[in-house]
Image (spheres, rainbow, N blue to C red):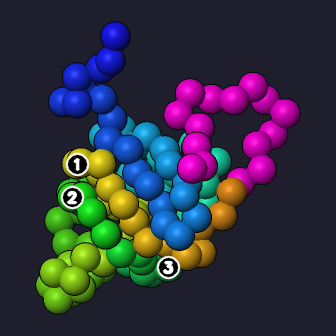
Amino acid sequence: MTTPPELRAPVVHIEPHGYTFDAPASLSILEAAAFAHVRLPRSCRNGTCRTCLCKVVAGRVSYRVEWPGLSREEKDEGWILPCVAIAETDLVLTAPEAEPIEPSSAPPRSGSARRF
């Protein structure tokens, strides 16, 4: 039985690498990526340093903070800050500096990244 789209977590696809992971509303995109063993560039984790800046190719996000460190023009061009962004829909993001995190010897977690 498949989960109805309105009940499942959005799926994030990272280009150009092909990493894919679930991004539940309880996690920022940066946190969801880390749980799925994908490292996105990061530093402050509060939307001010812009280290995690990446571009949305498709989909929609909302923010944990009222005004993240982006100009209106940058938002209009599709730039987001994954450290404070929540996936509202399935997303395709361009993040060339993303890389896999080597999993520890612990058993794999639900929501681990998939590569296609």
Q: CA distance from mark 3 to mark 1?
A: 22 Å
Tell whether 46 sits left or right of 51: left
**Which of pointers 3 and 1 indicates the residue nearer the eye?**
1
Q: Which residue is mark 3?
A: 51
On the rendered structure, is 64 left or right of 27?
A: left
The label on residue 80 is: none
The residue at 53%/70% (across/down) is 16
Where does the N terminus fall, quadrant-wise? top left
Please provide the residue range marked out in magenta: 101-116
Q: CA distance from mark 2 to mark 3?
A: 20 Å
Residue under the point 59% across and 75% down: 97
Percent x, y of residue 110: 56, 27
Dot 3 amino acid type: Thr
Residue 33 in picture, x, y percent from top left: 52, 51
List the residue tagged with mark 2. Answer: 60
Q: Is residue 95 above or below residue 27?
A: below
Q: Tell whether label 3 touches label 2 (CB within 8 Å).
A: no
